[in-house]
Image (spheres, rainbow, N blue to C red):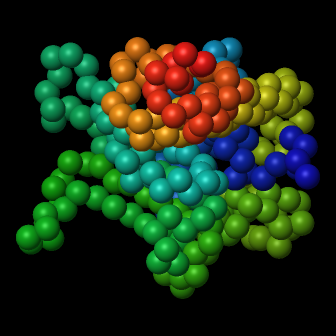
Amino acid sequence: MKKTFQELNLSNAFLFAAALEDPETCRLVLEIILDTKLPKVNVHAEQSILVSSDFRSIRLDIYASDEMQVSYNVEAQNDDRKNLAKRSRYHQAEMDVASLKPGDDFNDLKPGYVIFICTFDPFGKGLYRYTFEERCLECDMSLGDGTRKIFLNSKGRDDGDVPKELVHFLKYMEQSTDEYVSELTEESIIKLHEKVTELKKWRRLEARYMTVEEWLKDREAASNEKVKQKAKQEAVFELLEEYGAIPEHVREAVLEQCDLEVLKRWHKLAAKAGSIEQFEKEM
């Protein structure tokens, strides 16, 4: 059963992004993850889910920087699509482009952290935290490019190797409730929960969430339709190739056809036509 906006956990990508658009909440979360105190954090709202009305390219990751000129990209992930390594590379490239102005020296590039908070184990090793940086394979020397990629896993098992605060935060990501927080003593998570609770009372944000959910549902449906179309087109080609080389104009006609029902009919026709000429005549 679909959860209401008030029932969402912080692991929900929309709620997470909305919460971290508040600079204080963003700083709070980063301090828990990095286990260090940070100066003032600025959240860059160019891709704001609260302000932008362009749902064609909506993003649910947060780009921020602190007064020490360190950049951060933070994102909640609930689906293991086996692409986080490449995704982290893309986010790092984006941050580098944003931080270096034309004419700047490469030494002006800011240090950068790309952080994914996952409700699954992205590498299957049972760790709560996986931290990567560029290193020399021959002598295990750090490249010193100032970049790190951190993958957090709420299903970790190495409780003794990471701060309890981080473990409790990762559990909170999936149990963002009064009941769970009542068992905790960390002020940081209690304060975070207060901010999330207040956020859930914001009617404008709830309406925004419902709009985004509908947009994502429509996009997924359209994507599924395209997958089915492509599969049916390939099935038609596979049958036609048994009769010989497919003329380019026939191939183009099949590829340009987007109506799934027509493609289904063509598939049946290709199976019984006996020749490409007969298929073309009846299509």
* Image location (x, y in percent) of residue 144: 18, 53
From the viewer's perspective, is 4 left or right of 280?
Answer: right
Q: Is residue 19 visible?
A: no
Q: Considering only vertical position in the picture, is 255 above or below 68?
A: above
* Image location (x, y in percent) of residue 226: 60, 31
User: Which residue shows up at 30% across the image and 27% down it?
Assistant: 97
Q: Considering only vertical position in the picture, is 267 above or below 146?
A: above
Q: Is residue 150 visible?
A: yes
Q: How many marks?
A: 0
* Image location (x, y in percent) of residue 192: 72, 51
Q: Residue furthest bottom?
A: 160
Q: Considering only vertical position in the picture, is 262 above or below 131?
A: above
Image quadrant in which you'd find residue 207: top right
* Image location (x, y in percent) of residue 7: 88, 49
Image quadrant in which you'd find residue 177: bottom right
Please tell me which residue lies in front, 226 or 126: 226
From the viewer's perspective, is 37 left or right of 263?
Answer: left
Image quadrant in which you'd find residue 221: top right
From the viewer's perspective, is 153 left or right of 137?
Answer: right
User: Which residue shows up at 59% across the image and 19% down it?
Assistant: 283
User: Which residue shows up at 28% across the image and 58% down it?
Assistant: 133
User: Which residue shows up at 63% across the image and 15% down it?
Assistant: 54
Please tell me which residue lies in front, 107 or 242: 242
Q: Residue furthest left?
A: 138
Please tell me which residue lies in front, 119 or 145: 119
